[in-house]
């Protein structure tokens, strides 16, 4: 199972890419909770580059995909 660190580490600095619930093998409800934590605490190695995509389940909307940009690391 891929982790967010695995996905981010494969990208070049400044690259824009998608992270989805499916990539992390999470249900949209779980992914939505994870993204909310990233929005509050700061994401691990990337920043949001667009509006999160949401899906509807039982009348509720959950984030299931985000577009992000890998941030440069200071050395």
Image (tube, rainbow, N blue to C red):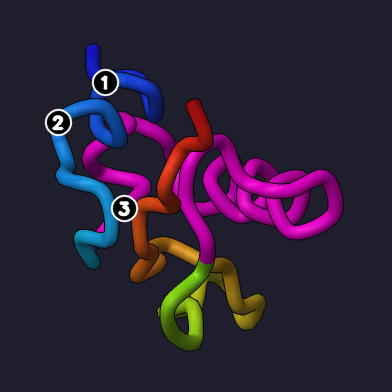
> What residue occupies the far right of the structure in this picture?
40
Whether residues under marks 2 and 1 lie with C-beta atoms below 8 angstroms apart, the answer is yes
Determine crowd level at label 1: few under 14, some 14-19, many 20+ residues with C-alpha closer than 10 A: few
Dot label at residue 20: 3
What stretch of residues is rendered in magenta? 18-47
Residue nearer the viewer, 54 or 49: 49
Q: Is 20 one of the magenta-colored residues?
A: yes
Q: Residue at x 56, y 36 (%)?
A: 44
Compared with 9, 11 (above or below) is below
Give how far across and how far down residue 58 sits, in percent.
58, 72
Residue 68: which quarter of the image?
bottom left
Residue nearer the viewer, 51 or 29: 51
**Horizontal side of residue 5 vs 14, given as left or right:** right
**Horizontal side of residue 2 vs 49, given as left or right:** left
Give the alpha-carbon distance from disc 3 to disc 1, as whole Å.
13 Å
Q: Is 37 one of the magenta-colored residues?
A: yes
Q: Residue at x 38, y 22 (%)?
A: 5
| Residue topped by disc 2 | 10
Residue 6: which quarter of the image?
top left
Q: Residue at x 58, y 68 (%)?
A: 62
Q: Quadrant of the N terminus?
A: top left
Dot label at residue 6: 1
Question: Which of the two marks, 2 or 1, is nearer to us in this view?
Answer: 2
> What residue occupies the far top of the structure in this picture?
1
Q: Secondary structure at mark 3?
A: strand
């Amino acid at each position: 199972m891929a982790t967010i660190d695995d996905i981010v580490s494969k990208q070049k600095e400044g690259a824009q890419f998608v992270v989805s619930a499916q990539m992390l093998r999470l249900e949209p409800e779980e992914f939505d909770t994870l993204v909310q934590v990233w929005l509050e605490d700061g994401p691990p190695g990337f920043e949001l580059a667009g509006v999160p995509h949401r899906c509807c389940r039982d009348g509720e909307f959950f984030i299931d995909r985000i577009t992000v940009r890998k941030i440069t690391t200071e050395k």
